[in-house]
Image (spheres, rainbow, N blue to C red):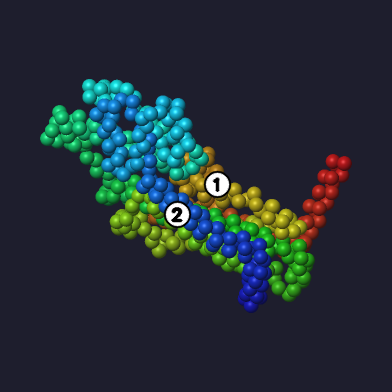
Amino acid sequence: MLESLVNMVVKEVKELVRDPRILLGMIIVPLIMFPLMGLAVQTSMEAAEESMKSLSIAVMDLDGGSVATSVSNFLRTLNVTVVEIKDLNFTETIEYVQQSSVTGLIVIPLGFSDNITEGLKAELNSYTVFRSGGFLESASSSTISALLGMFEDGLIFQKVGEKFPENPATILDPIVTSEKTIIKGKSIDVNPSVLFGLMISQSTAMPVGIMMLLMFAMQLAATSVASEKEEKTLETLLTLPINRLTILAGKLTGSIIVAVIGAAAYIVGFNYYMTSFTGIIPGQAGVDLAAVGLAPTPISYILLGASLFVSLLSALALAISISIFAEDVRGAQALVGPLSMLFVFPMIIMMFTDVYALPFPLMIALLAIPFTHPMLASKVAFTGDYLTALIGIIYVSLFTIIVLYIAARLFGTEKILTAKLKFRGLRLWKRKRKS
């Protein structure tokens, strides 16, 4: 029995790995695609940073007052290249800015300095040149707004300093807020935004990895049965002196092994891609998850592994049961493909919100999907909510037993060979009705 099972597992793994579609699409492509995407992101970010260092802004000063002049001087102190517009009207200036390489245009209207001096509202017009609508232009527009905001803050500080020369900074910012977090009934001296950011950075890849693993497993299991039906080797396999449950177990185990390899390739590539964004994420160092009680424990890993295992078994058995009704690999993939929504929908929800914060009907619908629970277990691993993970394991285990029973019944009868004949007859009957 054990020897037959081992031989079946080895056979399944060899056949799946030999398939160029699986080797290329599931292992090689992710290891190449994600690093290339990450390289593209890094290159774009570096180009944006270099462009910001050489920022150029055209200034059309229609006022000529001292405060208006200080706008250009302030920009120069921040290493911004200022292009002064003097001998052009507004229409000619717009055409010049559009054709030149400057990032934007600042128009200082007449009366600007007088209004500021007299304590009145003053208008300042900022224009950003729209050329391609790319990320760089968007960043440049935000930079111009930030620079003008800094200039305005300087004016405010100067005005307040004239009234309160001893402590203008205290007048402008009289309250110091200390943000802390409550975790598991304890007060922790950690900013919640930093903690949430750190948790997201550590748990984002988990739902994605679990979704990939389950999707790969279903596609592999469906391909395993359908390819043998397509190549007419399933009949021969079923005539061998091997228990059909052993054949089913071998296919399940072989698919699990190859699916884990494929998922690992995706996770490695995906993690490399995610690190491309570290340059734009605020620093989050100095927070020890274990010290604040959010580090996964050995029990958390055990529960997560158990939840993932039973979910994987149910996904494989479900794929095998469905692929029996397909005549070839393409048909099996078409039948199994729509089931990916059972993974994608929970993944999106789990990445962006809390399941228990959803409206009650949506929460029940989401928890009814068995593949939600391993993703939920990956989150509760950080919070130590073992009861939620345990209930999920029990629910998925019951679902898995039902699906395995159905798969075993199909493998134990001749339906595994005759199901396609029934579907072929159904298609012929539909064609006759249409004709």
Helix, strand or loop status at disc 2: helix
Q: Tell me which residue sits at (24%, 40%) in the image.
A: 177
Q: Outermost residue, bottom direction?
A: 3
Task: Rate crowding at label 1 as few (under 14), some (14 to 19) or many (20 or more) other CA atoms within 10 Å.
Answer: some
Q: Tell me which residue sits at (16%, 32%) in the image.
A: 161
Q: Nearer the viewer, mark 1 or mark 2?
A: 2
Viewer-closest of 310 and 429: 429
Q: Kindly identify which residue carries mark 2.
A: 42
Quadrant where the N terminus lies? bottom right
Q: Kindly identify which residue carries mark 1.
A: 345
Task: Rate crowding at label 2 as few (under 14), some (14 to 19) or many (20 or more) other CA atoms within 10 Å.
Answer: some
Q: Tell me which residue sits at (58%, 67%) in the image.
A: 257
**Image position, residue 216 (x, y; %):** 60, 59
Q: Outermost residue, left direction?
A: 166
**Image position, residue 135 (x, y; %):** 46, 44
Q: Which of the 4 image quarters holds residue 121?
A: top left
Q: Tell me which residue sits at (47%, 48%) in the image.
A: 351
Instruction: Check disc 2 and give the amino acid type.
Output: Gln
Q: Which of the 4 image quarters holds residue 291?
A: bottom left
Quadrant where the C terminus lies? top right
**Image position, residue 57 (x, y; %):** 37, 38
Q: Outermost residue, front direction?
A: 87
Instruction: Check disc 1 and give the amino acid type.
Output: Phe
Helix, strand or loop status at disc 1: helix
Viewer-closest of 355 and 149: 149
Residue 157 lies, with reference to residue 190, above or below; the image says above
**C-alpha distance separating marks 1 and 2:** 29 Å
- Residue 371 appears in the figure: yes
**Image position, residue 222 (x, y; %):** 67, 59
- Residue 360 appears in the figure: no
